[in-house]
Image (cartoon, helix red, strand yellow):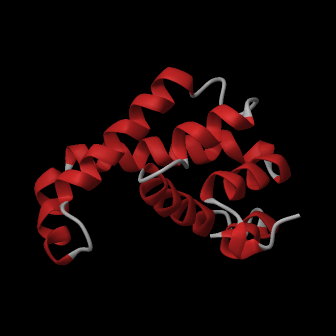
Amino acid sequence: MKTLKQLTNVEKAGILHSWFPDEVSAFLETMKGICNMITENEEEYRQKSQDGLFGFDFWKQLAGQAKKAITQYGSKMPKNRRLFTDQLFDGYQALFSVHCLTEHAKTRQLENRKFFLAVELLF
């Protein structure tokens, strides 16, 4: 078994999917909402991201890819761990997905404390 430091984002997301399959649908809805907020409030987010690690256009591209994956595969992702992890947590896409996941976990602190703690531990 790998240590936590040796796990990739894809593997961490797979663990989370296995431990909390009932949370996947709610996370996908949150992620879709974040994607919509970015496109609907583009100017506001563009201003906020001027001092960010990477440009807004890159972030918007990642949001677009996430939304496309959710639209195309969203109904299958709660049941298919590999599809969920490969589409949302591989490569640079993981930057946006991990951001959405940590934001989603904050909203679940009271309702599902173990999920929140698992996200905090893994990511």
Kindly identify the residue that appears in the image at 83 percent across and 47 percent down: 18
Q: Residue furthest right?
A: 1
Residue 112 x, y percent position in the rendering: 77, 63
Q: What is the quadrant of residue 56 in the picture? A: bottom left
Asked whether, in this view, residue 60 is left or right of residue 8, the answer is left
Q: Quadrant of residue 87?
A: top right
Is the residue 5 above or below the residue 19 in the image?
Answer: below
How many numbered marks does the figure carry? 0
Quadrant placement of the N terminus: bottom right
Residue 54, image x and y in percent?
A: 24, 66
- Give the residue displayed 16% in from the left and 51% down from the top: 42
Q: Position of residue 86 (x, y in %)?
A: 59, 39
Which residue is pictured at 78% across the width and 70% down the height? 113
The residue nearer to you, when weighing 4 against 110, is 4
Question: Horizontal and vertical percent for residue 5?
Answer: 69, 75
48, above or below 56, in the image: below
What is the quadrant of the C terminus in the image?
A: bottom right
Front-most of residues 61 and 101: 61
Q: Is residue 122 left or right of residue 15?
A: left
Q: Nearer the viewer, residue 102 or 40?
A: 102
- Left/right of residue 101 with respect to residue 3 in the rendered view: left
